[in-house]
Amino acid sequence: MSGEQSESSARPHIFFETLVRPSSSNHWLVAPQGFPGNPDETAPGYPVPVERLQNAFEDVIGALKSVRQVNRDGGLTRYVDKTALFHFKDDIRVQFLSQVPGNSSLAMYSASRIGFLDLGANRRRLQRWLGLLSDRLA
């Protein structure tokens, strides 16, 4: 996965600008403060250029056996992750965001394909990925 760069931006991708979140609780959005979609959690800012953030993220995701990259289009990367117990497929979309020179952040949306409840699986997934990313950049 590493090596191929996506377009980064300071503006939200059209996916996030038009995101209509379901009334169910089987999804989670992490994004910078002020981002569209009413984020459930504020994404951290990283004191690294966006390219380094993206490469570190791709290294983290590449080490996860249950995750595969599906496509990359116009600055948005889509992944699919299978849940451990029942192997349900969840969709995750990630956008890397340039901030002030030398700083970056990201927006991530994880949603279950089926069901109404996810027992916090999408939240835990994104929080785990953020933790792994922070460790990788340390």
Image: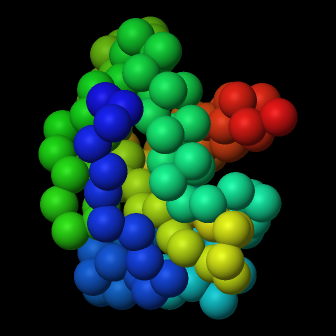
Q: Residue at x 20, y 52 (%)?
A: 72
Q: Residue at x 40, y 69 (%)?
A: 8
Give the camera-side residue of 40 and 1: 1
Residue 4 position, x and y percent, is: 27, 42
Q: Is residue 41 visible?
A: no
Where on the picture, by quarter, is residue 121? Answer: top right
Where on the picture, by quarter, is residue 131? Answer: top right
Q: Quarter of the image containing the C terminus?
A: top right
Left or right position of 88 against 74: right
Reply above or below: 121 against 25.
above
Reply above or below: 26 against 85.
below
Q: Quarter of the image containing the N terminus?
A: top left
Left or right position of 60 against 72: right
Left or right position of 128 against 60: right
Q: Is residue 85 visible?
A: yes
Give the camera-side residue of 57 and 113: 57
Q: Residue at x 18, y 38 (%)?
A: 70
Q: Residue at x 78, y 60 (%)?
A: 47
Count of numbered tags: 0
Reply above or below: 66 against 117.
above
